[in-house]
Image (cartoon, helix red, strand yellow):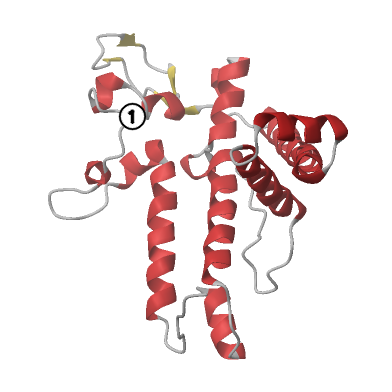
């Protein structure tokens, strides 16, 4: 990984927890919003949305520690962690709304969405508008009958909701919403790439495991607890 290799070359220390948190944030944003905030860079810069996200997370933690009457009083007076929470939520909201606006504009000029461009925000916008034309589609080269029994005429276009297919009990069984990595491993031990398309979130778990493995095996690193 370039960031860790950069740290090795500089012969400096790095907080591995910070690296993993930035890694998670970038890829959650990619999977959910289709946007890479690039918090995991060689500079380890403070990206406003990431800083705000952390402050919101910490403030919500305090709500579970403080008596309800105390944090509600802080919220009313806008002091302490509740003040940070209000400011953080405003920054996070602006960030998400900007992503939504950009995504809507991008989809408005598209007639289809490729597999590698698909994310949760795209799915929600498609479902909200009911505009099936922006989904991945295929054209029938001859008349046929689908496995469902529906007739398809020659030249007809078939549109597929990738988001919905990843959650259909008819396709995956009653455990369709459960996390089962073996779904994407063939009998020969290979990854079944087409199935991964419908369960994009699984990629985050694999990416993080791969990152952790690289962090441990990279030469030049000495790990210590802090």
Q: Residue at x 71, y 29 (%)?
A: 69
> Does residue 162 appear in this view?
yes
Residue 122, x across and y down, in percent = 58, 32
Left or right of 168: which side holds 46? right
| Residue nearest the observer in this picture, 178 or 111 | 178
Residue at the limit of the structure toward the right, as seen here: 77
- Quadrant of the rendered image containing residue 21: bottom right
Residue 174, x across and y down, in percent = 23, 22
Residue 81, x across and y down, in percent = 75, 44
Residue at the limit of the structure toward the left, as seen here: 187
Q: Residue at x 45, y 81 (%)?
A: 223
Position of residue 211 relative to residue 121, above or below, is: below
Q: Secondary structure at mark 1?
A: loop
Residue 181, x across and y down, in percent = 27, 45
Mark 1 surroundings: few (<14), some (14-19) or many (≥20) residues within 10 A: few
Q: Residue at x 60, y 28 (%)?
A: 111
Left or right of 164: which side holds 20? right
Left or right of 35: which side holds 172? left
Left or right of 226: which side holds 203? left
| Residue nearest the observer in this picture, 87 or 151 | 87
| Residue nearest the observer in this picture, 68 or 184 | 68
> Does residue 131 appear in this view?
no
Q: Residue at x 70, y 49 (%)?
A: 55
Position of residue 105 relative to residue 31, above or below, is: above
Which residue lies under the disc numbered 1? 177
Count up the numbered dots: 1
| Residue nearest the observer in this picture, 17 or 58 | 58
- Quadrant of the rendered image containing residue 14: bottom right
């Amino acid at each position: 990984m370039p960031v860790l290799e950069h740290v090795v070359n500089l012969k400096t220390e790095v907080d591995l927890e910070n690296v993993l948190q930035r890694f998670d944030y970038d890829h959650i944003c990619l999977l959910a919003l289709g946007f890479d905030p690039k918090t995991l860079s060689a500079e380890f810069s403070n990206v406003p949305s990431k800083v705000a996200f952390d402050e919101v997370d910490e403030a919500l933690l305090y709500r579970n520690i403080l008596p309800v009457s105390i944090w509600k009083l802080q919220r009313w007076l806008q002091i302490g962690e509740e003040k940070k929470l209000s400011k953080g939520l405003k920054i996070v909201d602006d960030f998400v709304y900007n992503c939504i606006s950009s995504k809507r504009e991008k989809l408005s000029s598209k007639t289809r969405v490729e597999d590698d461009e698909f994310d949760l925000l795209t799915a929600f916008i498609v479902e909200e508008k009911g505009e099936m034309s922006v989904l991945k589609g295929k054209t029938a080269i001859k008349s046929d009958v689908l496995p469902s029994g529906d007739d398809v005429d020659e030249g007809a276009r078939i549109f597929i909701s990738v988001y919905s297919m990843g959650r259909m009990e008819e396709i995956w069984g009653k455990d369709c919403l459960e996390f089962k990595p073996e779904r994407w491993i063939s009998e020969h031990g290979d990854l079944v790439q087409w199935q991964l398309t419908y369960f994009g979130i699984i990629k985050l778990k694999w990416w993080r495991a791969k990152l952790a493995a690289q962090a441990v095996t990279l030469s030049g690193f000495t790990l210590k607890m802090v």
